[in-house]
Image: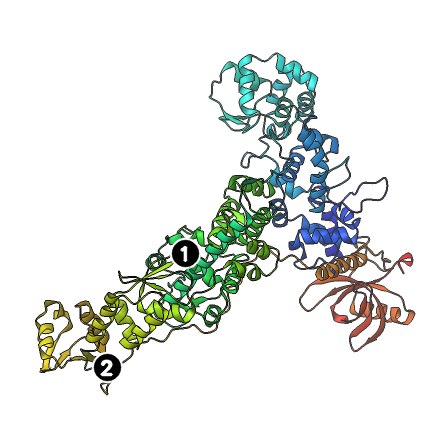
Amino acid sequence: MGTGRLTGRRDQEATVPEASTAAGSAGGSPAGSSPRSLAEALRARDDAALAALLRARPDLLGPVPGDVTQLATRAGTRASVVRALDRLDRFALQTAEALAVGPDPCPYAVLEGLLTGGEDERARAALPDAVATLRDQALVWGDEDRLRLVRTARELLAPSASRPSPTGLGPTVAEATAGMSPTRVQEIVAAVGLPATHDPVSAVTALTGLFTDPERMSALLDEAPAEAHQVLGRLVWGPPYGEVTPNPTPPVRWLRDRGLLLPATARTVVLPREVALHLRGGLAHRDTAPVAPPVPAHREHRPQLVDANAAGQALAALATVEELVKSWEHAGPPVLRAGGLSVRDLKRAAALLDTTEPQAAFWAELAYAAGLLAGDGEADERYAPTPAFDDWVELPPAERWSHLAAAWLPATRTAPLVGEQDPKGRTLSALGPELDRSAAPEVRRRVLELLGELPEGGAPDPETLLARLAWERPVRGASDLRGRLARWTLAEAEVLGVTGRGALSGPGRALLEHRDPASLLAPLLPEPVDHVLLQADLTAVAPGPLRRPLGDTLAVLADVESKGGATVYRFTPGSVRRALDAGHAAADLHAFLKEHSRTPVPQPLAYLIDDVARRHGHLRVGAASSYVRCDDDAMLGEILVDKRSAGLGLRRLAPTVLAAQADPTVLLEGLRAMGYAPAAESRTGDVLVARADAHRTPARSAPVPVPEGPPVPDATLLAAAVRAIRAGDVAATAVRKEPAAASASAVPGELPRTSAAETLATVQAAALTGSAVWIGYVNAEGAASQRVIAPVRVEGGFVTGYDHTADEVRTYALHRITGVAELADDQV
């Protein structure tokens, strides 16, 4: 089949009114005429309006349509229409739903009546903008006296038995009586006082005319019993279906006999759409929402207080992320076979951070999104810090926070989903697959934008903010993911320091506006301190964030007991031994504390260090499998008779040496658990410093967010796409001469297939005369297109000429030209 016939069929489909999409709001039909097809409506748009459509619905660009007809066909496909409907605000969607239950085509006045009932001034004022939005989105086309909703949108929004409409309306009389016997239809016609007809079609038409006539309908309902009005009142706003027994009550029988209730199944009846609209006063919706709900400030705080609160949260976030990632630098948790973190390891992380498991999952996901940790890629894969973590910890605190916040805002990883189940019933794990939600970045940014519209220091009621988001993107399915994402955003922004006390902070506002948040955050953060306050109860109080060398050494020498504005460290025998194992001598520890404490070193702490140091290394453990060496043979005797040493497999080799079956690491841990302070030694008898090298992954890049649909095209791509569509349309609509020898079966207006000889002769003649020809061409990928070219050279199996479609000189292979025709005289 030639390219011409393919294009002709597309154009035929695009001229079917129901399959068409909207004409642009800019540019219309020729004066005094209404567009009869989608292609005509889109063709009437100017370039700016066509670019606006492609920007609003970028899925239409994949790939760039060859012409306007192809664009029209693609804009009416189900997947594309669903995406467009999902991006409408509530009132625009209600307008589309009203069109779906209205006549086709629908005059603007009828649509206005469906939405306003002639009384709602706010809806009347908002309706022009809603219709313009539907036009711009290519969901509605036609002039105001013939508005048409695209067929796919009508199918999606119109009520059916399996898919109720948000309007609460049911099927029309014609739809509800489609399977009814002609005799039954005539009985209904007679019951309402209409004359009998010769066929069921005219009977249904007469019944529809009655139900849509306000005066006659009111007269019919005046005859109904009071109980029948109660039945109608329960169905009028939906759902329009109700169950009936084989022997219905008299009110239901009265309604059914007159067609005011029509059978849907053997045990259900439905209220016809025309009857419901009469009872509603012509309204398609019980309540319309023409205006976006406001988001006022629920609480007012001083901006300085908001920023101070956010700065405190930011500082805590930095400490938490650093603590988590550092805890995984020696022996990080293993990666599950299916990917992610096990429940047990997540619990350990939560205990380490002194927080809940959902919060621990958030911090792990944030570090992962920022590129600070990843799997190490080994055969026994484990999570570990990346090399980027070492660079990150050296940055000033404000810049470190800016890095985290910049990773959080566009991330599609959604930590609150951890613990839920995927569609296959598998539990979602932290750092595992299936946590990406492409809507998350858009929702986060929109939440921050709404916060940014409030006065500085203003915090909204979360429910009003959620109501606004629900109006901007109504939920059409069963899952309110956007609402959940919005709630999670509010919570995450607060713990991260993007907001403070529910209000957008100064750094958060800078982040939203693509400015440098670090410059605003830096003055709000306390300067790192170079001292601690030692207490007599073996604790040290850090009155602020510690400078890095001090903080790193103190983290080895003491355990963190509590966090907050001031961090409390506690010295224990185990923490002191840890410092000695790391290579610090007792004298070094005394000097360190004396240098960095603003208070005298308490005597109990000095005694603790000396006592642990005196016992540290008194026992020596080496590899035999392993052995214990000590100059004090009495101590070795105590160890041998201690029941707790039974599992180590000890036996005396010499007065000062014990051999063990356990390896040195297990032996060290076992003796330490018994209260001793052994030290490991090398083959030469030197004490080994237990300073484990920090494990790092190979260089890793941060995970790329998963976009929601195709990316929004930039101005350059839009301009090029519009030019290509316009040029393709010129080729598709160019009038061609019919060859004199055209077969009788050829379809008028289509390019007949030409032989290789005919093709060669035609393009050679065009090259000699300097005229343009129309060709069908199939490229190497098999894509067919139509071109209008002016050949200038034909040689070596190729034709070179000026391509009017592409507006440039191109070369085409003759064997790929499917057909050729001269242009009509008025087209040359």
Residue 501: x and y in percent read 49, 47
Estimate the spatial distance between the alpha carbons at disc 1 and disc 2, rounded to whole Å: 42 Å
| Residue nearest the observer in this picture, 425 or 473 | 473
Q: Quadrant of residue 110?
A: top right
Q: Earlier in the sequence, mark 1 or mark 2?
A: 1
Q: Which mark is residue 565?
A: 1
Q: Is residue 536 left or right of residue 250?
A: left
**Residue at coordinates 64% horizontally, 18% vertically from top-left?**
189
In the image as oriented, which residue stretches furthest toward the bottom? 684
| Residue nearest the observer in this picture, 23 or 56 | 56
Q: Is residue 115 left or right of residue 435?
A: right
Identify the amino acid type marked 2.
Answer: Glu
Q: Residues within 10 Å of mark 2 (few under 14, many from 20)?
A: many
Residue 549: x and y in percent read 40, 71
Identify the amino acid type marked 1.
Answer: Gly
Q: Which mark is residue 328?
A: none
Residue 223: x and y in percent read 61, 11
For the C terminus, the quadrant is bottom right
**Residue at coordinates 54% horizontally, 56% vertically from top-left?**
409
**Residue at coordinates 50% horizontally, 61% vertically from top-left?**
401
Residue 260: x and y in percent read 59, 21
Against 14, residue 367 (above or below) is: below
Q: Secondary structure at mark 1?
A: loop
Does the image show residue 429?
A: no
| Residue nearest the observer in this picture, 815 or 609 | 609
Q: Residues within 10 Å of mark 1 (few under 14, many from 20)?
A: few
Does the image show residue 674?
A: yes
**Residue behind mark 2:** 681
Q: Secondary structure at mark 2?
A: loop
| Residue nearest the observer in this picture, 667 or 529 | 529
For the N terminus, the quadrant is bottom right
**Residue at coordinates 86% horizontally, 42% vertically from top-left?**
31
